[in-house]
Image (spheres, helix red, strand yellow):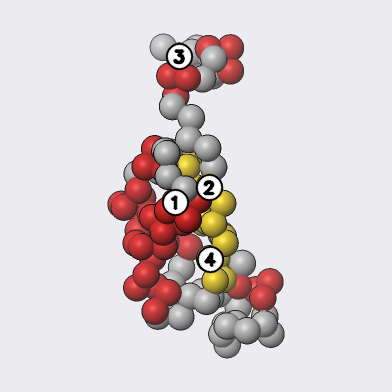
Amino acid sequence: MATATDMAQALRAALGPTQLEVLDESADHAGHAGAGPHPYGTHFRVRIASPQFAGLSRVAQHRLVYDPLRQMITQGVHAIAIEIIPHVHPAATPSSLQAPPSQNS
């Protein structure tokens, strides 16, 4: 049975995301199609930003997310809601929004 940690590891290895959040929402889908006997491991939400998504269509971006998760899907993951977050290069962040230097430097 897949876990959010398993998915996060696979996505980190494949896409080098700059932001990643994987949530197991299986308990919210109890009684729905594809829900298993346990309240985990069937329905997930992935929020991800990666420079690899640049210039790709939404369908192509979603394929990049699905590809490293394919084995988990064949083993019982029923649904993955994918939210692509715009990738912002750290150098593009205005200095006024960056964290101040540590006082212990």
Other residues around mark 2 within 10 Å, as few (<14) / some (14–19) / many (≥20): some
Q: Earlier in the sequence, mark 3 or mark 1?
A: 1
Mark 2 lies on a secondary structure that is strand
- Check disc 1 and give the amino acid type: Gln
- Pointer 2: what residue? 84
The answer to whether 35 appears left or right of 41 in the picture is: right
- Pointer 4: what residue? 80
On the question of residue 21 being in view, the answer is no
- Check disc 2 and give the amino acid type: Ile
Instruction: Give how far across and how far down residue 37 sits, in percent.
Output: 57, 87
- Check disc 4 and give the amino acid type: Ile
Q: In which quarter of the image is residue 10?
A: bottom left
Q: Which of marks 1 and 2 is nearer the N terminus?
A: 1
Disc ID at residue 104: 3
Q: Would you say the residues marked 1 and 2 are in contact, meaning their CB atoms lie under 8 Å apart? A: yes
Instruction: Give how far across and how far down residue 2 sits, in percent.
Output: 43, 72
- Pointer 1: what residue? 61
Q: Would you say the residues marked 3 and 4 are in contact, meaning their CB atoms lie under 8 Å apart? A: no
For the C terminus, the image quarter is: top left
Q: Would you say the residues marked 1 and 4 are in contact, meaning their CB atoms lie under 8 Å apart? A: no
Mark 4 lies on a secondary structure that is strand
Closest to the camera, between mark 3 and mark 1, is 1
